[in-house]
Amino acid sequence: MMNVPPLQTTPQSPEEAEQFCADVMAKLDAFESILAQETAHVAAARLGESFALTDKKGEAAGAYLQAVEAMKRQIGPLKKLAPELLFRLKERHEALKSALQHNMRTLATVKAVSEKLLRDVTADTLKGKALDTYGSGAQMTPVRRESMTAPLHLSKRF
């Protein structure tokens, strides 16, 4: 078998097509593995570990997308030389889509929970800061939060 850069050259034999598909599958596996790690970290509230995977995830996603583009360019020869491998790659790609959807749901849940926590903390912080004022008929009425303005912060450096 010739030593051909698998994703750069058109496969000419079943062995080269198999190597080409194996390289695409390896890139898919690497991306899916990092995605699963990130999902597990986020679900377990280990955000630091999740953030540490950001660069690796981006690189793996980019490598996989490049491999998919190379595969699209070579689809004709691959269909002739390795149709069963293309079918397996399509199945694995569908599984990756499912893993991506799970990852996105996990991230969306964490985002929604963190936003709710921030809103609750803000509401609790502002709860005791409502001013009482005299309204009509000398009745004490609390000032509505919407009418309160945030304090200004002035810098004395400038």
Image (cartoon, grey):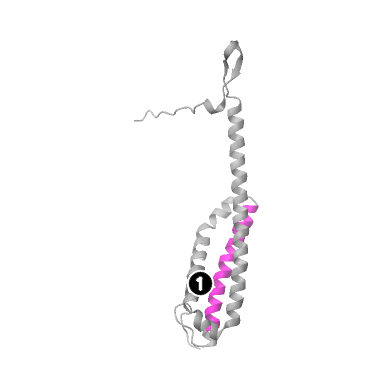
Magenta-drawn stretch contains 12: no
Q: What's the residue type where badge 1 is placed?
A: Val
Farthest residue to the top: give it: 138
Farthest residue to the right: give it: 44
- In which image quadrant can residue 90 be found? bottom right
Farthest residue to the front: give it: 136
- In which image quadrant can residue 141 be found? top right
In the rendered image, residue 54, in percent from the top left (x then y), is placed at 52, 57
Residue numbers of the magenta segment = 17-43
Q: In this view, does 123 lie to the left or right of 62?
A: right
In the image, is residue 42 above or below residue 58? Answer: above
Residue at the (56%, 69%) spot, across then down:
28
Between 98 and 151, the one nearer to me in the picture: 98
In the image, is residue 56 above or below residue 150? Answer: below
Magenta-drawn stretch contains 18: yes
In the rendered image, residue 61, in percent from the top left (x then y), is placed at 51, 64
Q: Main secondary structure of the magenta part?
A: helix
